[in-house]
Image (tube, coloured by chain):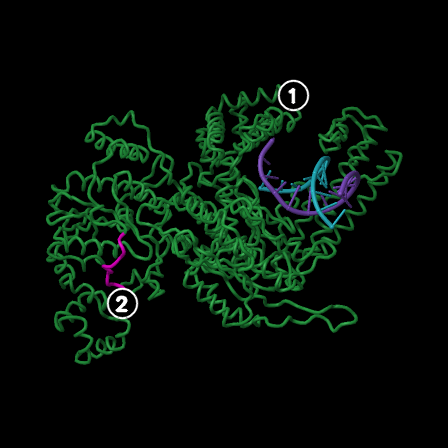
Chain colours: A green, B cyan, C purple
Amino acid sequence: MKKGDHLFLVDGSGFIFRAFHALPALTRKSDGLPVGAVSGFCNMMWKLLTEARDTSVGVTPTHLAVIFDYSSKTFRKDIYPEYKANRSAPPEELVPQFGLIRQATRAFNLPCIETEGFEADDIIATYARAAEAIGADVTIVSSDKDLMQLVTANVHMYDSMKDKQIGIPDVIEKWGVPPEKMIDLQSLTGDSTDNIPGIPGIGPKTAAQLLEEYGDLDTLMARAAEIKQNKRRENILAGAELVKLSRQLVTLRTDVPLDMPLDALMLEKQDGPKLVAFLKTMEFTSLTRRVADSCDCDASVIEPAVVPVEWGAAAHGPDLDSDTSAPGQPTASGEAAASSAAPVKATAGSATPADLAAARQSAFGSQPIDHSTYVTIRDLTTLQGWITAARETGVVAFDTETTSLDPMQADLVGLSLAIQENGPSPGAAAIRAAYLPLAHKTGRDDLFSDGLKLAENQVPMDAALAALKPLLEDPSVLKVAQNLKYDYLVMKRHGVTIKGFDDTMLISYVLEAGVGAHGMDSLSERWLGHKPIPYKEVAGSGKSLVTFDLVDIDKATAYAAEDADVTLRLWLVLKPRLAAAGLARVYERLERPLVPVLAEMEERGITIDRQILSRLSGELAQKAAAFEDEIYELASERFNIGSPKQLGDILFGRMGLPGGTKTKTGQWSTSAQVLEDLAAQGEPLPRKIVDWRQLTKLKSTYTDALPGYVHPQTKRVHTSYSMAATTTGRLSSSEPNLQNIPVRTAEGRKIRTAFISTPGHKLLSADYSQIELRVLAHVADIPQLRQAFADGVDIHAMTASEMFGVPVDGMPSEVRRRAKAINFGIIYGISAFGLANQLSIERSEAGEYIKKYFERFPGIKDYMEATKAFAREHGYVETIFGRRAHYPEIKSSNPSMRAFNERAAINAPIQGSAADVIRRAMVQVEPALAKAGLGEKTRMLLQVHDELIFEVEDEAIEAAMPVIVSTMENAAMPAIAMRVPLKVDARAALNWDEAH
DNA sequence: CCCCAACCGTA
DNA sequence: GTACGGTTGGGGG
């Protein structure tokens, strides 16, 4: 760069926000991707590059760079933790655009610059001063007042939206002070949007007046005692320290290390086809045409670019504190911390998430794990050292060791930590890990000894927790855990609420649902090539199993510290893959914010009435016994009715009943279907078996088992939700499974009456009506279905009417039943075989139905074919929110295996999108209730796939119901504007049966 | 003691 | 035809 050159510095981050608010809010691509800010950016860049001379800038750039904020973790946060702490999460539509605008910048062949630890403004300041020193002119494309301090005779700003150049006179006109006094002015006034403190009662006018009077800030502060107005004088004198701090915060740094020298910012020739390809993908038709004309290429023959960044896209957005995406979520700077810990230096612009992911993989994928480096923390001073180190790095992996797998019963035994030390060279970073034993015991617990004693040389539990609490609760230090919900609950029960976290299990789940398991051991083997010490080698198994507090501390150290070590390595390898795959948003919106929500649901539990269950159990036992007598009578022998093998041998062997089918192991099948068929032929025994099975099922699985799950202290039942168990994105529930409590039969529903509210409360159940069919209508865009849902008509009757030409009025129930089965079948990826089974009709007849259905709803057929093709091409399918479900066997050469995978792949986007919707509702509903003043009176307890169950104070029910219903009905917004309304039914009662 | 198959409860 | 988890029986180590 030389004298006379003209450098343009575009404030990319500032532009995103400004464009977003200035342009039509919902400019979207046809697939729903919001692109308003991207569109504004592209138009502005094109204009600058081609006709800057014709704008108020009046010159053509010779050099140009687009500058972005790297993350919100900057030196300003270090000197003032509250800096920008009041910022709320960026609007949801904006998040994917951060990444897209970086993509756009590259499509324009422009340098895309960001530097860890600094804001875009500091980088701009550094470049501006450097260029100025050479004698070049500078135009800062931004209207942000924070940049006005940089304006000089040679440095101008340019407000691209108003097409207005800003020079020294403009600054004076607007603020009453020349640019060089802007720092002084801002130090006095502070800045509420960035949470920078200022002197109370002093705004820009007063500040300008004071600076005019005293000359500059230093003089003003030195002579503040002379100020006549009492209040003002006192405020200024009292705020002297704050003013100093504010000055540090508002002063832009001009010494940012620049990875790209000025010369590298020289404008290069546009790559026309590349730019056209990008613009085409974005569906910016008029700009595409203009660019194509100008570069003389034919837009119609250029394929749209594959834009790797889609819904989940923001690699690093300014304030991609998307941790805050969910109200109630900790305001962690996950991304920020992630990057600061990067062993691979994040270089300006050039390191894409994919590069980083690849570098991390090579750095950690095979680095051996050395147990001998692990330390045992035995005193508070050492612990403090680890805490300090964690704060310096900003990232710490941690893991709890406890006495139980059940987080509601588990007592803390110890805690392990792992942090990363930056090594001498990139990639050679080392991980240190330690174990902090807290409640290990020694001695023998038998008749001859005096019992177990606390082992020596352990930091006292209270002191350790007091020291760790500020770290664990500090959202700006990222805590990395594997299956964090467990540790979150354990720590919450010990008085610590973890804020600012990542969960390697959930990251893996978002990346690879459907590919293997997401437990630590399998992740470690898959990604690190390392098999961690098996738990049973430490604590034994079976009869010799001991609780972790009885494990020898040295052994415990090797095991526990390794867990933290492995977790940190997994995080380093996996986290960058999220952004690289465009899945950051799925993780941040659908997974991470749900952790505390579910943890609290589990902690609350639900009351069950043991008397009701006990009475039911007695009744069931009696009824079952009666059946047993009759069964033995009819079978003419006593046998174990619960043994399908014995039953099959009797029915089809000794009794020689017809119509037997074999299971895949060659056993006689005794399924309910088979027994029903036999009963239909007039055989008395099979029906009795079916009824007996129902009764014993209810008894053993529910009435007898549930009381065993009542927590000894809370007296409630606390299920455990698994967030990473299903391929589709659904949750699962276990110990006990409260997602399969009977409802279909009258006998079964009695069990639901045992789920009750606490006195003064009711249970409120809110469930989505037909959510999966609505999702289908949305994704496949079926006019009749959309219309039916818009009109609120009976969807199965509509289907029947459409297919069989039968009017809805007076439709026979059998006709509707068949249509209903077909509708369900569609969702399940229909086959003639399955439909025939379901309806007990011939395969050929089922095939006819399906054919007819596809004729009436050709869009469904198209959707299915398109989904299968997508799955074959990519190995996964996507929900409407971008969650992926992988089907690695979709190309299997085994036809039935392949067909199975195809059906699953058809089902997954439907089931998964519905699951995503309710996840969003769960994240949104508690803040919505809190906002309505109902936070203390309404507690979400359970989720059953399309239903949420709350416990609500009696007097709050009327108010809570509409909040819950509307939150659920609008849960897809604003990420997705569904083409079909969602409908939620809600009811409150004293027990779950009546509420449902 | 562990694992699998069969069966069946839910959405 | 999709997605789960729990119980039981029964076999193997």
The secondary structure type at the circle numbered 2 is helix
Q: Position of residue A832 (x, y in %)?
A: 60, 24
Q: Indicate whether residue A288 is drawn in magenta.
A: no
Of labels 2 and 1, earlier in sequence is 2
> What's the chain of the residue with tag 1?
A
10 Å crowding of disc 1: few (<14), some (14-19), many (20+): some
In front: label 2 or label 1: 2
- Is A419 drawn above or below residue A888 in the view shown? below
In this rendered view, identify the residue nearer to me: A68 or A234: A68
Q: Which residue is mark 1?
A: A842
Which amino acid type is shown beneath numbered disc 1?
Glu
Q: Position of residue A331 (x, y in %)?
A: 41, 58
> What's the chain of the residue with tag 2?
A
Q: Which residue is mark 2?
A: A246
Q: Position of residue A986 (x, y in %)?
A: 54, 48
In this rendered view, identify the residue nearer to me: A479 or A730: A479
Q: State which region is magenta.
A: A248-258
One can see residue A692 in this view: no
Which amino acid type is shown beneath numbered disc 2?
Ser
> Which residue corresponds to the image point at 76% horizontal and 44% vertical from the top-left?
A696
- Is A406 drawn above or below residue A48 in the view shown? below
Could you tell whether A876 is left or right of A97 in the image?
right
> Which residue corresponds to the image point at 17% horizontal and 38% vertical from the top-left?
A50
Residue A87 sits in which quadrant?
A: bottom left
